[in-house]
Image: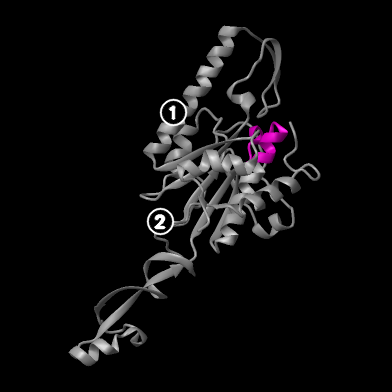
């Protein structure tokens, strides 16, 4: 298994993520946001130049927004309402289970997705928080440490299921989870927890072609990347077919769970060029959007 932090293997993925962020961003458009002052249309009213409506004056209202021209005509105080401008909140969670890094291409794709999300929030002037998730343990990813190339991960023990129940989600935030979803028990621990009331959440799932359609034949040494256990497995055509069918059904159920919980699930293959993978796999689903 390739170390997720080996020497310069993080440099190239980050560069490709920054390049991809020139073309795409997280799906911020067509959503009413709440948060601190920023550049995105909010769900409330504020002081932007985007006029929204009028309403009668209420004691305590800011007199700067009284429509004095209307008062001169009617003698009644009315307020000019403008669209609130806010910084969207983004809560980003990265699954750091060993299966996310068991092949160099998949490890690179994992970090490309992570850095793309962070770069997208930075360019969009959003307000991000990030966490590393290992089994049931959730540790905040300090953004200043990431900028310095330091990653402070929780310890992986290999004896618990992957769960989002410990993530301190913020209200009204865009929830983004990066995971390969290979834990067979993730249905009850991931999708309900990622669901965000009536808001759409985002799940980005890197995967390798070898996971989806392996060509194993004969005696194959199998390594459980979660536990380190090795064993020899003889693969004949029927067993290989059953594996592929089980894998397909697993992600069909994941797609069904995602639709039920209003989650955009985009599976991103590790072997494709990153920008092209976003263009063909994530963009059609609305999981990313082009810049205006």
What residue lies at 39% left-to-right and 37% top-to-bottom? Answer: 259
Q: CA distance from mark 1 to mark 2?
A: 28 Å
Q: Quadrant of residue 207?
A: top right
Name the spot of residue 243 as percent of width and height, x first. 56, 16
User: Could you say whether the residue bearing mark 2 is in a helix, strand or loop?
Assistant: loop
Q: Is residue 8 left or right of residue 161?
A: right
The span picked out in magenta is 96-109
- Residue wearing tag 2: 30
Name the spot of residue 153 as percent of width and height, x first. 67, 46
In the displayed structure, would residue 179 be above or below residue 291?
A: above
Near-viewer residue (94 or 226):
94
- Residue 137, disc: none
Name the spot of residue 280 as percent of width and height, x first. 54, 39
Near-viewer residue (159 or 8):
8
- Residue 253, disc: 1
User: Could you say whether the residue bearing mark 1 is in a helix, strand or loop?
Assistant: helix
């Amino acid at each position: 298994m390739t170390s997720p932090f080996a020497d310069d293997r993080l440099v190239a993925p980050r560069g490709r993520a920054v390049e991809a962020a020139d073309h795409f961003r997280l799906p911020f458009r067509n959503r009413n946001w709440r948060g601190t002052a920023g550049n995105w249309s909010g769900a409330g009213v504020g002081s932007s130049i985007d006029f929204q409506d009028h309403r009668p004056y209420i004691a305590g209202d800011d007199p700067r927004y009284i429509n004095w021209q209307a008062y001169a005509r009617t003698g009644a105080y009315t307020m000019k309402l403008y669209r609130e401008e806010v910084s969207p909140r983004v809560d980003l969670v990265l699954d750091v289970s060993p299966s996310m890094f068991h092949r160099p291409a998949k490890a690179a794709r994992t970090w490309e997705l992570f850095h793309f999300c962070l770069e997208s929030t930075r360019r969009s002037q959003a307000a991000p928080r990030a966490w590393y998730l290992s089994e049931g343990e959730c540790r905040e990813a300090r953004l200043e440490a990431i900028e310095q190339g330091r990653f402070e991960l929780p310890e992986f023990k290999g004896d618990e299921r992957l769960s989002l129940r410990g993530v301190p989600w913020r209200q009204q935030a865009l929830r983004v989870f990066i995971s390969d979803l290979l834990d067979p028990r993730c249905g009850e621990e991931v999708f309900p927890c990622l669901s965000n009331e009536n808001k759409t959440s985002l799940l980005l799932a890197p995967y390798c072609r070898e996971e989806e359609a392996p060509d194993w034949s004969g005696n194959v040494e199998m390594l459980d990347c979660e536990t380190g256990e090795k064993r020899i497995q003889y693969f004949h055509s029927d067993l290989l077919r059953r594996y592929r069918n089980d894998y397909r059904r697993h992600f069909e159920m994941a797609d069904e769970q995602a639709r039920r919980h209003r989650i955009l699930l985009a599976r991103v293959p590790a072997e494709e060029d990153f920008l092209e993978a976003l263009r063909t796999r994530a963009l059609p689903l609305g999981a990313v959007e082009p810049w205006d």
